[in-house]
């Protein structure tokens, strides 16, 4: 498996949110050693790669997306030696490793920003005598004033000052950071806020709009996102990735206004992939999924590379809750895992975990909660490993609902109908039938609330989002839930069928 340069095109990538995956040292926070110890779980699941959300030195103002040292591991998560051991063992199991790169902003504790606060070398950040009208994605103004009266830009929390990418020193630094991790053997990067970095010349006001600016994102191009200049950065990075053997890749987290804009991030001289968030935003309805799938395939055609599929991540409510229950979530997962391209799974989704909706406010840690009243903590609750006692976590950093004992990896391990075993079976079949993640897709005639997609000649995916059962067009290879007594596919169920 390792060694194939195009591995990422149909890869199933598992996102580890390090604070919440597995805790080896018992301090209530997950760590790299915890990930290493649980690689067996990921190998049994059958994923091709793991993507690690940030584990770098960080004061954790935004769960590690505020980096104080891009070349080291935060003591909470371990050491560089732990990282090396994790990479070596993952590779030994045939699992590739993708790390998160956060280039739009650093932590306010980064030595560069500390120096800037002392009034020296402010050219690495965006300091101005007066703020403009830009707003932080987490709510409130995107500018904070320092002691001597100047203001600095932070598109996210004040603890996340935006770097000045017009400064060649910043560019050189990140080229070097890329090499640092490539030299340590990483197989790829997830680029955080890949549509940020370059701001429109002169930092023009957005202009008066109704409601928070964050609500406009996705519909319009704002002067701080998706600027043309950002593509020059990726054109600098691509030759670096290509200069290493084994198919090193990068995937963009870019929230832009259309598939056409997204397509500009991907190609032989820029990044390999971009997250296709439209699929994550689709409703649980055949029509909604079909519209998004068609759009995504168009985008893939534009860039000549297969798209990505995501149902859950660390920023959005888990899809069990979003789609209205476990049955639907399992059905949506079977749909996703039979679409051409690569699929990204999130920390614990293989256990069918729901969003935790009742976290006490005083325990919420997301900086967006204080600024905007919205919190992403509910999808970041540590995942249950054991079905008794502390569920595998001594004093976890967010409380785990006691009811999750029955959702633990241990509880699901030997239950053939468990969500864990559904994911395992799906990934096994996906390996056996490479056409499930690749190849072409043909829409078959179906009732209005039903999707019927032919993948390989003979392999068909059926998703029933309606209220009536539908009959099965062949031999069932895998079903997301129990079939009706007469073998029909009940509502909120998907099946993979061989004809
Ligand atoms: C990305 C991350 C999110 C983080 C933000 C700022 O959107 O996914 O978790 O808060 O960037 O780095």
Image (spheres, helix red, strand yellow):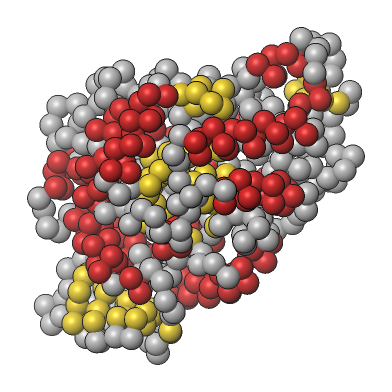
Report the front residue among 470 and 184: 184
The quarter of the image that holds ligand 1 is top right
The mark tally for this picture is: 0
- Relative to 56, is 447 on the left or the right? left
With respect to residue 101, does 307 lie above or below?
Answer: below
Q: In which quadrant is the C terminus drawn?
A: bottom left
With respect to residue 346, does 7 lie above or below?
Answer: below
Q: In which quadrant is the N terminus drawn?
A: bottom left
Instruction: Name which residue lies at 52% across and 51% down.
Output: 249
- Camera sees residue 21: no
Q: Position of residue 81 (x, y in %)?
A: 38, 24
Report the front residue among 415 and 498: 498
With respect to residue 411, does 123 lie above or below?
Answer: above
Query: Residue 152: which quarter of the image?
Result: top right
Q: Position of residue 357 (x, y in %)?
A: 39, 39
Instruction: Name which residue lies at 85% across and 39% down.
Output: 203
Q: Position of residue 246 (x, y in %)?
A: 45, 52
Query: Residue 36: which quarter of the image?
Result: top left
Instruction: Name which residue lies at 69% across and 27% down.
Output: 161
Instruction: Name which residue lies at 76% across and 43% down.
Output: 198
- Relative to 147, is 177 on the left or the right? left
Query: Residue 465: which quarter of the image?
Result: bottom left
Q: Position of residue 354 (x, y in %)?
A: 33, 46
- Camera sees residue 83: yes
With respect to residue 207, does 73 lie above or below?
Answer: above
Most extreme residue toward the bottom is 445
């Amino acid at each position: 498996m390792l060694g194939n340069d195009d591995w990422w095109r149909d890869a199933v990538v598992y996102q580890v949110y390090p604070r919440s995956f597995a805790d080896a040292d018992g301090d209530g926070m997950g760590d790299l050693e915890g990930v290493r110890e649980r690689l067996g779980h990921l190998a049994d699941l059958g994923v091709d790669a793991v993507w690690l959300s940030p584990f770098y030195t960080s004061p954790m103002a935004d769960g590690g997306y505020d980096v104080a040292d891009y070349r080291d591991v935060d003591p909470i998560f371990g050491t560089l030696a732990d990282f090396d051991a994790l990479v070596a063992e993952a590779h030994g199991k045939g699992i590739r490793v993708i790390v998160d790169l956060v280039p739009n902003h650093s932590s306010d504790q980064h030595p560069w920003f500390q120096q800037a606060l002392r009034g020296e070398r402010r050219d690495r950040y965006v300091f101005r005598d007066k703020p403009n009208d830009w707003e932080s994605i987490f709510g409130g103004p995107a500018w904070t004033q320092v002691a001597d009266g100047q203001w600095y830009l932070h598109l996210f929390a004040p603890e996340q000052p935006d770097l000045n990418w017009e400064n060649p020193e910043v560019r050189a630094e990140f080229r070097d950071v890329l090499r640092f991790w490539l030299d340590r053997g990483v197989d790829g990067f997830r680029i955080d806020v890949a549509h940020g970095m370059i701001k429109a010349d002169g930092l023009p006001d957005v202009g008066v709009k109704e409601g928070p600016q964050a609500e406009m994102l996705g519909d319009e191009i704002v002067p701080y996102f998706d600027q043309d200049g950002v593509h020059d950065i990726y054109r600098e990075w691509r030759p670096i990735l290509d200069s290493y053997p084994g198919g090193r890749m990068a995937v963009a987290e870019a929230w832009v206004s259309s598939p056409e804009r997204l397509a500009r991030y991907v190609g032989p001289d820029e990044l390999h992939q971009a997250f296709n968030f439209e699929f994550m935003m689709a409703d649980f309805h055949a029509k909604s999924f079909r519209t998004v799938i068609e759009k995504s395939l168009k985008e893939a055609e534009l860039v000549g590379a297969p798209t990505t599929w995501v149902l859950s991540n660390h920023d959005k409510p888990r899809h069990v809750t979003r789609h209205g229950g476990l049955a639907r979530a399992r059905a949506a997962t079977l749909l996703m895992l039979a679409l051409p391209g690569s699929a990204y799974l999130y920390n614990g989704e293989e256990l069918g975990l729901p969003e935790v909706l009742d976290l006490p406010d005083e325990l919420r840690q997301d900086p967006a909660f204080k600024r905007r009243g919205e919190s992403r903590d509910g999808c970041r609750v540590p995942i249950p490993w054991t079905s008794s006692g502390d569920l595998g976590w001594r004093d976890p950093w967010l409380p785990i609902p006691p009811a999750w004992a029955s959702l633990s990896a241990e509880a699901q391990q030997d239950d053939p109908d468990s969500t864990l075993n559904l994911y395992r079976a799906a990934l096994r079949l996906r390996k056996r039938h490479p056409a499930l993640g690749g190849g072409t897709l043909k829409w078959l005639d179906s009732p209005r609330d039903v999707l019927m997609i032919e993948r390989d000649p003979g392999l068909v995916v059926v998703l029933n989002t309606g209220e009536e059962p539908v009959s099965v067009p062949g031999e069932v290879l895998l079903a997301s839930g129990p079939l009706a007594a007469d073998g029909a596919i009940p509502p909120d169920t998907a099946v993979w069928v061989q004809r």
